[in-house]
Amino acid sequence: MRLLGLAGLVWFGLAGASLAQTVLSVDKKRIELNVSEAKFLKLETPAKAVFLSNPGVADIDLQSTSYIYLIGKSVGETTLFVLGDDETPQLSTTISVGIDADRLTRAARGAISGGNVSVTSRDGAIFLQGRVPSPVDISSAEDVVMALTGPNAVVVNRIELAQSAQVNLQVKIAEVSRTISDDLGFSINGSGRHGSISSPTSDIVNGFAMSVTPTSVNVNFLLNALSQRGLVSILSEPNLTARSGETANFLAGGQIPYRMGTDDNDNATVQLQPYGVELQFTPVVLDGGRIEIELETKVSEIDKANSDSTDVGPALTERSASTTVEVGSGQSFAIAGMFQSGTQQALGGFPGLVDLPVIGALFRSSSFSRGETELVVIVTPYLVEPGSPGSFTTPVDGLKPVGGVEQWGMGRFTRPLKPGQDRGQSRVRTTSGGGFRLQ
């Protein structure tokens, strides 16, 4: 006896299989099973060979020459072929494996923390529907259904959030600049009847100056000794709000056109490249008010030193960072350590005099400068809900426009409102009727 397509014999011992053994007659042209359900098929004549066209959908076990044990594995259809002793086809029938919708619905509801879901089957696909309180519940219900229906099942998840969670992201992008400029030497400026002499000087603060004044010539010797320490600047403070699972973008800067080539008509093709402060984030609200954030930030500016080396467009310097973190509402995290540094050294003086031994140092000036900038990104997410119109304010709330006399006499355009006073109507109005001009 030959037995083909028995890759799923282990299913006979699975505890998850429904062993409500229904004996089917051989005259059935279509046999319907649920996933993990088992049925017996009784043959009229002894079988010599049994096989399936798609063993991934169902499995068979030939208990004897007259009984076939059928087990549903995954959603789909397969064809069962039975050959008799003379190797002629004895049976050809379709096995359709579906789902036990009630069983899957109970399993899906047991995997969520709240809400209501249901499972249905149509046209070979499994549909999940309902409303749940969190995105984690959506994933949990789908995972349970996928585990119970097999890898070949087509699962369409239409579960919605009972209330779409929204995340407000408050970001502060700061640039910490540390600049050290050291100048040491003499600057000489002189003037007389026949002209003047001078040496280059830099903008010096709190330097030491010495002056020598002969009869008709003024000469100033300036000793430069200066160190400057830099500053902290806030590049941008974007405030963005996005739904859970959606992406929000921010750009404070502009776009630079780059020539990319020519088209078929020899016209120049241009591509716009954004520059400035860019921010993109995707929040996902988890259980317990936790927020998972996928954040990408980039700061770019025109590189003047290298912009002349290409005719395509100006070069850009860029610093970027991307990360995925999990924080609570109102908690902050920071991204730092993105350094950019540069060093300059210069030596100047009068030609010839600077080369003299010993006294040449009096006519020489050296300068050294080093600049370092570090980009720091501080992010604070908040879970937010829509509010009523009265819960929001603007910078002009509490101010009332004033009339022309008060504008001219007092030099102001607004004045604070008294407690309980309404803003009223502004005295500034158009000289003609408002409306649209139709053409």
Image (cartoon, helix red, strand yellow):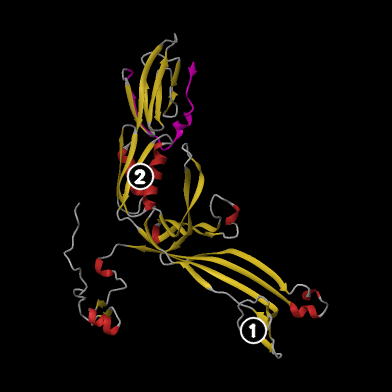
Q: Residue at x 19, y 57 (%)?
A: 436
Identify the magenta region.
1-26
User: Was residue 173 drawn as part of the magenta stretch in this picture?
Assistant: no
**For residue 20, above or below residue 365:** above
Disc 2 marks a residue whose amino acid type is Ala
Q: Give coordinates of residue 323: x percent, y percent.
A: 51, 57
Q: Residue 23: percent from the left, percent from the top? A: 33, 24
Extreme residue toward the top, this view: 86
Local crowd size for mark 2, using a 10 Å CA cut-off: few (<14), some (14–19), many (≥20): some
Q: Is residue 158 left or right of residue 179?
A: left
**Which circle's residue, 1 or 2, is located before the other in the chain?**
2
Q: Position of residue 123 (x, y in %)?
A: 31, 32
Of residues 141 and 323, the one nearer the viewer is 323
Q: Residue furthest right?
A: 357
User: SS of the residue at dot 1?
Assistant: loop
Q: Nearer the viewer, mark 1 or mark 2?
A: 1
Question: Is 177 rendered above or below residue 140?
Answer: below
Residue name at image x 44 percent, y 56 percent? 280
Q: Which residue is mark 1?
A: 207
User: Which residue is more in the foreground, 421 or 274?
Assistant: 274
| SS type, badge 2 | helix
Q: Nearer the viewer, residue 114 or 122?
A: 122
On screen, residue 236 versus residue 162, left or right, reads: right
Residue type, numbered disc 1: Gly
Judging by the rendered image, the residue that carries numbered circle 2 is 107
Horizontal side of residue 304 vs 86, given as left or right: right
The single residue placed furthest to the front in the displayed view is 194
Above or below, 245 against 92 in this view is below
The quadrant holding residue 427 is: bottom left
Q: What is the crowding at mark 1: few (fewer than 14 residues within 10 Å), some, or many (at least 20)? A: few
